[in-house]
Image: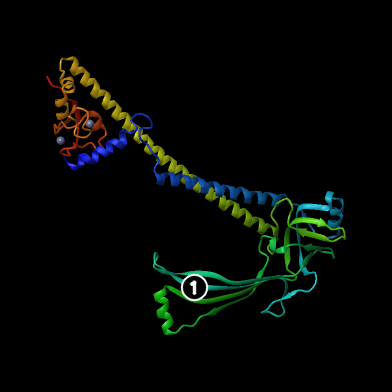
Amino acid sequence: MPTSLLVNRSDRRAVTADPEGMDGFAVKVSEAVCLGASFALSGICYYLYRKSRTTVNTLNDAPHFNIDKKLTDVLKVTPGVCLQYAVVEGAVQPVGESLNSHFQKETAGVLQKFSLREHRLVWNGFSRTWTDSERLLHQRVNSVPFMLVGSDETTIKVMCPLQADGVQMEITHEKFHQVNYGLGDIVGQFLSGEKLKGQLETEEMLKVGTILTGVGELVLDTDGTLKLQPPSNGSKYFLSITDFDTLRGELEGTAVTWKVFAIVFALAGAAALLWVGRRYYKHRKLHSQREKERREFERLQAERMRNGAGGLEDGLDDDEDNIENACLICLSQPRNCILLDCGHICCCHSCYQALPQHLCPICRQPISRVLPLYHA
Ligand SMILES: [Zn+2]
Ligand SMILES: [Zn+2]
């Protein structure tokens, strides 16, 4: 028996396992992964977009106040002596002692961040280039209590500045310490695929006198001090050395970016869905075509039997004959079709329909037509 017949038999089993229902259509793992990942990522991006959109909206709705006597009066008549979300702008002033820069002795500040980063070149075997990689070795943040001073002598104490979002510090010192190599090091680097470039030392500070924009909850304490603190209603707390419009513009940009990503992933998901749909449509079409073929075959068979040809029933009646004439693929049903143009009679009609390709299983010739077999 030709090996192709053995292969075909297992194919047939796969196809006829579900002959009527969804007729063996299944979504492939790769398609399921594409669909799931696209829609999940789109959902995440949409969630982040909604979140940043809400932040921008609350920022747009927040009232702006000048830091002066009037603000104290406003707060005194506000229920709960608290404004849940407000925007203020003032000059930074330490409450007590200020911090001094380690590198510029004349620079004083209230927040200070010192960081040391290691820069390396790592050989990327895929792109066949050296790429930069950065690692934070050390970071230290110092802070002293500070306040914002307005046009008159009114001040607002800034609480928990390190919890706030936004750009709060400017770089006061930056130095790159390059590494010098000997010949042995260079050989070692090419063997290990890693080159140490050096260390970047930076100091950032929020300098005294900087105009800072603060967005948060404003409260008037019992002792008469004004305080800016993280909002208790869950809105975002901002402290930024850029002005309010720049801060809002940046957040707006972030929202737009998430929106674009959400749309892109949704489109990718839709494309994957369309792809699966198209495959399903083709599958259905093939199935109905086979169904039509089968009906046509049965019609022809019935017609010929009516015309007095009982060949098939003869075959079924006689057991020995039946085995002799059994379909070469399923070995159970009688061979009842003639494959044209080669003329081979080797299989039953259901096995013919289950053939993965329209090729004769014996001689591999293309099958142009199938006729029912009958004996006169
Ligand atoms: Zn068969
Ligand atoms: Zn053939």
| Kind of residue indicated by mark 1 | Arg
Report ligand 2 position as a quadrant. Answer: top left
Coordinates of residue 358 in the picture (x, y in percent): 23, 36
Q: Residue at x 80, y 69 (%)?
A: 95
- Res. 206 visible in picture: no
- Res. 367 visible in picture: yes
Q: Residue at x 31, y 33 (%)?
A: 16
Q: Quadrant of residue 204?
A: bottom right
Q: Nearer the viewer, residue 90 or 365?
A: 365
Residue at the left extreme, as displayed = 376
Q: Quadrant of residue 174?
A: bottom right
* Local secondary structure at mark 1: strand
Looking at the image, residue 39 lies above or below residue 311: below
Task: Identify residue for label 1.
Answer: 120
Looking at the image, residue 230 lies above or below residue 356: below
Q: Residue at x 67, y 68 (%)?
A: 169
Coordinates of residue 138 in the picture (x, y in percent): 60, 72
Label 1 Cα crowd, 10 Å radius (few <14 / some 14-19 / many 20+): some
Q: Nearer the viewer, residue 290 or 321?
A: 321
